[in-house]
Amino acid sequence: MTDLSPDLPRDPRHDPVLREEVIAALAIAPGERHVDATFGAGGYTRAMLAAGAEVIACDRDPDAIAEGQALVAEADGKLMLIHGRFGEIDRLLAERGIDAVDGITFDIGVSSMQLDRDARGFSFQKDGPLDMRMAQEGETAAEWLNRADEAEIADVLYHYGDERQSRRVARAIVAARPLSRTGELATVIRKALRHPPGAPKDPATKSFQAIRIHINGELDELMEGLAAAERVLRPGGRLAVVSFHSTEDRIVKNFLRERSGGDAAGSRHRPAPIGAARAATFQPPARKVRPGKAEEARNPRARSATLRSAVRTAAPAWPTQLTTKEAISC
């Protein structure tokens, strides 16, 4: 495993999930150029720098960019920090004269920094404004919940949160409107699902996750990011993706299976293309990696994490990408 005795110390605010496993999958050689497409508090970026990489990092959250400037200064010219969406990473790199990189890492979903700040409205464990916007622009969670009809809310909870009682929760949300605080929403969900105080898993978890994914367009962003990574990784470049939600993991799994030639026969959801088969743009992916018990004990948020990785071939990037329905189908 890669030696991570860092010249740059770990950020005490953020010890990223599967840190050593991600760096091992990236197999960084000193002087290589790598992208941390979801900078957050900079945990993966620090590890990449310690392994000898030059790093381009991006984040759509302006707070992450502002607070990352100290690390830019500390990195002595080896870190470029960009404000932008990772689904547009190929454009962001091209604007800076970069057409290919040796590795790209995605850490999908909300960051620990965002969860821990009640003013951002991502967590039901602390009361705050019902916001949930990663980029701090556009429609807030409160604005959407207060205008959407019951069926739309139920669909989001069901498809993005795997909430089996989505209709009951959506009905309770509509009846309780207007909502403006995370505490209000959490209480409505708990009452709708008859949650006994002290039960091990808070029933608000799934609904908060689903609403956040919807507000930030996270599944579309993930698919755009994977396609962008395919375009900018040089032959032999490495892709590493950490996800925390079953639908996100399914998108990554299906993308790598298709792009590595493992889906040549097609399926009932995704028929095989007519004519000549496209050349595989990735080698067969490595086996998925899950956190060990020690990491789960140290960081309970790691429990649902999955790492998938693969190596880019020399084949040209495919001209099209999957629809959301195709990407999440088995």
Image (cartoon, helix red, strand yellow):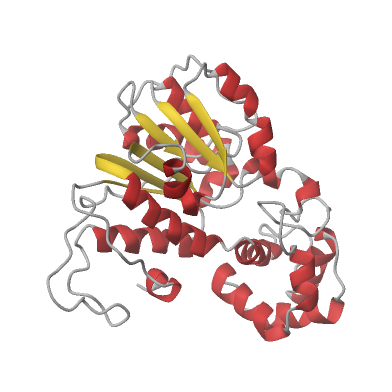
Image: 182 above or below 153: above
Residue placed most toward the observer, 171 or 298: 171
Q: Is residue 2 visible?
A: yes
Residue placed most toward the observer, 256 or 30: 30
Q: Quadrant of residue 61?
A: top right
Q: Residue furthest left?
A: 276
Image: 220 above or below 307: below
**Residue 91 appears left or right of 160:** left
**Residue 151 appears left or right of 176:** left
User: What residue appears at the point 35 percent right and 72 percent down from the top-left corner?
Assistant: 330
Image: 60 above or below 6: below
Residue 36 rendering spot, x and y as whole percentages: 47, 38
Q: How many marks?
A: 0
Q: Quadrant of the N terminus?
A: top left
Residue 99 rendering spot, x and y as whole percentages: 35, 41
Residue placed most toward the observer, 59 or 308: 59
User: What residue appears at the point 33 percent right and 61 percent down from the top-left corner?
Assistant: 255
Residue 44 rendering spot, x and y as whole percentages: 49, 33
Q: Quadrant of residue 101?
A: top left
Q: Quadrant of residue 291?
A: top left
User: What residue appears at the point 44 percent right and 54 percent down from the top-left corner?
Assistant: 225
User: What residue appears at the point 55 percent right and 74 percent down from the top-left corner?
Assistant: 159
Q: Is residue 306 visible?
A: no
